[in-house]
Amino acid sequence: MRHSIVAGNWKMHKTYSETHTLLDELIEKLPSGKEVEVIVAPTFVNLASAVAHLEGTNVQVAAQNMHQAEGGAFTGEISAQMLTSIGVETVIIGHSERRHYFNETDAVLADKVNTALRHNMRVIYCIGEELKDRENKQFLNVIFNQLRDGLFHLTKEQWSNIVIAYEPVWAIGTGMTATPEQAQEIHAFIRQEIDRKYDKSVAENTSILYGGSVKPSNAQEIFSKPDVDGGLIGGAALVADDFVAIVNAAN
Ligand SMILES: O=C(CO)COP(=O)(O)O
C-alpha cells in the first residue's frame, strides 16, 4: 500500500559501536507516531544487532544489497535467506553505486528482485539518470529503460512488495538536489509508466521515494509534491538530528 517512507542508507559508514550510538539517538528522538515508516540500512555486519536493538520500536531494518543466488560458492556475498533468517525483510536493490562501482546490470538486478520476492522480501528498487542523460535530454528514456528492464517482468501482485527510489545520480552526495518540480516530474512519469504497463491501482499503490542530497532544509518542500512519498537519505541519515528532522518533514 502506498504510504510515506523515510529510509536511511548508511552505505559503508559506521562501525559497530557507532551504529549502536546512532540507533540509540534515533530511538530517543524519532517521533512515536506511525504516519511515516522509518527504515535504516546499516552495513551487513551490523544488521543482526540492529534488528535486536530496534526490537519493539517502529523502525525497520533493511539491507543495502544481496546476491541473486540462493546460496553456493560466491565468496563474500550474502543471500536472501541469510537476511530473512536474522529478521531483515527489506532490501535496497539497484543503488547507483552498485550499478556503477560493481557493474550491476539491469539483468542482474531483475534476478535480485526475483530472488528477494521469492523470499517474501520487500524491495526498494533504485533508478535514476546520470548528469549526461539530463544534459542530452535522454533522462526519461534512461528511467523508462531501468523500470522496464528491472521491474516490468513482475506480475501485478508482486508489485505490492516493490518501493521505487528515484535517485538522480548527479544529486547523490553532491549537494545538488533535484528541484521539487524536477522530482515531481519524474515521480509522475514513473507512476504514469506503471499505470501504462499495469493499471491505476498498481500505480497508485506504489510508494515512490526521492533520493539525492535530501537535507532538513529541503525535505519538506520535496515531500510536499503529490507523487513524492518520502525519501531515501544518504549523508543526512548519519546524523540523528538531521534524519529525525527529515522524518518529521514527511509527517
Ligand atoms: O544515495 C543516496 C541514498 O541512497 C543519497 O545520498 P545523499 O543523501 O548523501 O545524496
Image (cartoon, helix red, strand yellow):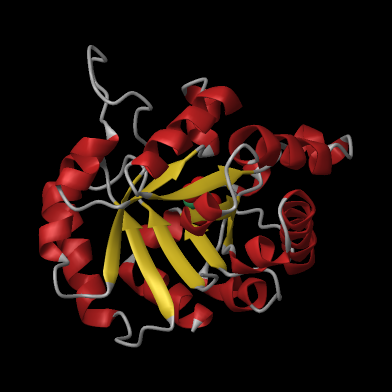
Tell me: 56 left or right of 128: left
Q: What residue is shown at x 51% (from left), y 80% (from top)? A: 249
Tell me: 10 left or right of 222: left
Q: What residue is shown at x 29% (from left), y 86% (from top)? A: 32
Relative to 109, residue 123 above or below: below
Q: Can residue 16 be seen in the rendering of this structure?
A: yes
Tell me: 167 left or right of 243: right
Q: What residue is shown at x 51% (from left), y 50% (from top)? A: 158
Relative to 33, residue 45 above or below: above
The picture places residue 187, in percent across and down from the top left corner, at: 71, 60
Q: Tell me where residue 130 sits by quadrant.
A: top right
The picture places residue 215, in percent across and down from the top left corner, at: 53, 66
Q: Tell me where residue 112 sits by quadrant.
A: top left
Tell me: 87 left or right of 170: left
Relative to 92, residue 31 above or below: below
The picture places residue 200, in percent across and down from the top left corner, at: 73, 65
The picture places residue 44, in percent across and down from the top left corner, at: 23, 40
Relative to 49, residue 248 above or below: below
Q: Tell me where residue 99 sits by quadrant.
A: top right
Q: Nearer the viewer, residue 46 or 145?
A: 145
Q: Nearer the viewer, residue 25 or 81?
A: 81
Total tally of numbered discs in the picture: 0
Q: What residue is shown at x 25% (from left), y 51% (from top)? A: 88
Q: Can residue 105 be seen in the rendering of this structure?
A: no
